[in-house]
Image: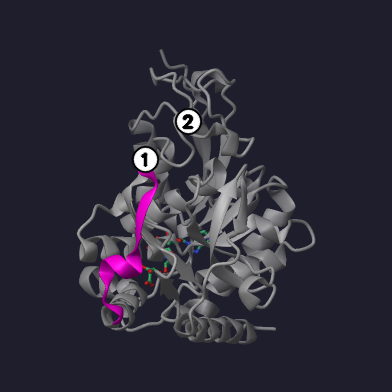
Amino acid sequence: MESATLRINNISGHLTTSGVRGGGQCPFSQKSTAPLACPEKAWSVINTSPHAKPNPIRVLVTGAAGQIAYSLVFMIASGQMFGPYQPVVLHLLDIPKMQEVLNGVVMELNDGAFPLLAGTVATTDVKTAFMGIQVCLMVGAFPRGPGMQRSDLLKMNANIFKEQGAALAKYAARGVKVLVVGNPANTNAYIACLAAKADLPSTNFSALTRLDQNRAVSMIAERVGVPVAKVKNVSIWGNHSLTQVPDVTNAVIQDFPEKGLTTPVLTAVNDNKWLEESFIPQVQNRGAAVIAARKLSSAASAANAIVGHMRDWVLGTKDGETVSMAVVSDGSYNIPKGLVFSFPVQCRAGEWSIVQGLKITPFIQLKLDATTKELQSEIDALPK
Ligand SMILES: NC(=O)c1ccc[n+]([C@@H]2O[C@H](COP(=O)([O-])OP(=O)(O)OC[C@H]3O[C@@H](n4cnc5c(N)ncnc54)[C@H](O)[C@@H]3O)[C@@H](O)[C@H]2O)c1
Ligand SMILES: O=C(O)C[C@H](O)C(=O)O
């Protein structure tokens, strides 16, 4: 029996949809009593056991009426981001002219009857959207079209991140984990972090390069002829742009994980020319290739990458495995402090840390220098 108290109000231009199902308790339908794989690695906010009191977390998706969100919100509601024991209240923000579409997204969320969806707050009001949120997925921004570079969006999108960075500082939970997706993602994360600087630590902020990592993993798996799950520790360094650095120097094919047997990707591919002249440019240009084919930027694969990024951040990465996240540089690998730069990281207990001591070849170092320079020039171009 569902004692839904769903209300849809359209008051003074603000669509506010809120509902708490089952009297605030998430009606778990999962029969499994198995705890998550490594609960000791999870952020303390996340329920990793079916026996814990269900305590919904508040997750904001901005740009909730857009393309990426149309995959993302359903993946979150189905438990793919926070695991099978963690209920969510979805906060959904878009701009006033998208109210009607946002309303439709809420209808479909309700029609999905997701057991983990404890409520929705759909709104065009920034304060309502950011109030008390613990996870913030900043998708809302204009996408590029054919022939554009992501940096061409800087002027169009910068103000969104300035305003929303300030809203994070004012209204969000102090431990809020922020993932910027809207392009140019690294510099938008830099802007949001700067706007919140006095109130939130810079370690709360990140930008998405997981899609680039997934693209690179998929290309290596295809080249070597192994399932994608066997390709580990491919890194993306730097900017989510044409200068990004897909790097397989430290990557392995996990042949027999139970015996700890691995083969370096460099050995398995055994073709440096292909890696340097085909693999790297293909990963760098994949976003543009999708736009050319779809006439729209990647959306479902972006949603999947967002889920992977946040899931690893809150639930922890597997032992010995690295993932790529753009985070505020602490000076590691001589990357200037403060730049939002993609590094290989590991996550435990809700904290990321940059993997230290990885081998950087002279070829990769030249590329790191170029992507650093580009990020600095994006920041120099910001309106003062
Ligand atoms: N980092 C990545 O890997 C990656 C991957 C794919 C797309 N992207 C970027 O993500 C962004 C969104 O892509 P999309 O395909 O969903 O675009 P979209 O145009 O389909 O959706 C964007 C939504 O954001 C909304 N929006 C605009 N301004 C807003 C504001 N101030 N507050 C809240 N919402 C606002 C729009 O109304 C729209 O509904 C784009 O900038 C795109 O380039 C990044
Ligand atoms: O390429 C784009 O503009 C969209 C996104 O950043 C992507 O990598 O697919």
Q: Residue at x 33, y 73 (%)?
A: 283
Residue at 72 percent of width and 47 percent of height: 174
Q: Is residue 298 above or below residue 175?
A: below
For residue 315, above or below residue 333 = above
- Residue nearer the viewer, 4 or 54: 54
- Which label number is shown at residue 36? 2
The verdict on residue 270 being magenta is yes
Judge from the rendering whether residue 172 lies leftward or rightward of residue 342; answer left or right. right
Q: Is residue 171 visible?
A: yes
Closest to the observer: 294 or 251? 251
Can the viewer see residue 92? Answer: no
Question: Where does residue 225 sit, x and y in percent of width and height?
Answer: 20, 59
Describe residue 130's horizontal placement relative to residue 81 as left or right: right
Separation of disc 1 and disc 2 at Cα? 19 Å
Which residue in the rendered view is the most extreme toward the right?
198
Q: Which residue is mark 1?
A: 258
* Dot 2: element: loop
Q: Quadrant of ligand 2?
A: bottom left
How packed mark 1 is, by other alpha carbons closer than 10 Å (few <14, some 14-19, many 20 or more), is few
Q: At x 54% / y 44%, what residue is drawn?
A: 316
Closer to the N terminus: mark 1 or mark 2? 2
In the image, 125 versus 280, the foreground residue is: 280
Asked if 110 appears above or below 10 in the picture, the reply is above
Residue mark closest to the camera, 1 vs 2: 1
Q: Position of residue 97 (x, y in %)?
A: 45, 59
The answer to whether 128 is drawn above or below residue 344 in the figure is: above
Q: Which residues are magenta?
A: 259-272
Residue 181 covered by magenta stretch: no
Q: Position of residue 67 (x, y in %)?
A: 35, 57
Q: Characterize the local packing of mark 2: few (<14), some (14-19) or many (20 or more) Cα atoms within 10 angstroms.
A: some
Quadrant that contains the C terminus: bottom right
